[in-house]
Amino acid sequence: APSLFDERLLPNNISIPDGFRLRPLRRDDFGYLELLKQLTSVGFINQLEFRKRFDAMKRAKSYYIVVLEQIGSSKIVGAATLLIEFKYIHEAGQRGRIEDVVVDAAMRGKKVGVLLNEVLVDMAKLIGVYKLSLECKTELIPFYEKFGYSKNLHFLDQRF
Ligand code: 16G
């Protein structure tokens, strides 16, 4: 099945625990949705819709969804997204956003979140973003600060 992005973009200087593989999301990774349900509401998405959304993300060339696969079970136990936003400011610069960081409940406390964040920060630097940002719960601020972020602007949203 096709990958969302070229896997050669993944950094090779970050060590992955034995029995696990880091790779881009693939078009047949329907099980990714089960993991996302541990982050927030996913609702009902069938396989056709999953593939359509995958194709749209791939065409956009701005979505880097990285997954950690448990090799024996082929299960996705962690995932995180780097999204690249095109700007005119900063000399037609690029802004990076970290989204949908999720680690399977059975895999928490094993530094999977650390691994995913290190990988995406490296990729963002390689791609050449002028800034990288994310939104998180208050209690996760100290966790994210370890990767170089500082609490700066306020984040506002409205829901529909
Ligand atoms: C968190 C996520 C964000 C995700 C949102 C979903 C990180 C760093 N942040 O803020 O990416 O989209 O949760 O929650 O993973 P929502 O369903 O309330 O929007």
Image (spheres, rainbow, N blue to C red):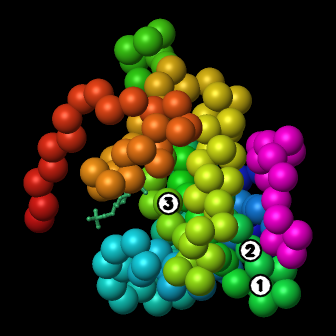
The residue at the point 47 percent across, 16 percent down is 92
- Residue 94 screen position, x and y as percent: 50, 26
117 w.r.t. 125: above or below: below
How packed is label 3: few (under 14 Cα within 10 Å), some, or many (20 or more)?
many
- Considering the numbered disc 1 on the image, is that residue within a helix, a strand or a loop? loop
Residue at which label 3 appears: 101
Mark 1 vs mark 2, CA separation in Å:
6 Å
Residue at which label 2 appears: 69
Circle on res. 7: none
Asked whether residue 32 appears in the rendered view, the answer is: no
Residue 53 inside the magenta-drawn segment: no
Residue 11 inside the magenta-drawn segment: yes
The residue at the point 50 percent across, 67 percent down is 102
Which quadrant of the picture is home to ligand 1?
Answer: bottom left
Asked whether residue 41 appears in the rendered view, the answer is: yes
* Mark sitting earlier along the chain (3/2): 2
- Tell me the amino acid under the disc marked 1: Ser
| Circles 1, 2 touching at the beta carbon (< 8 Å) | yes
* Mark sitting earlier along the chain (1/2): 2
Q: Which residues are magenta?
A: 7-20
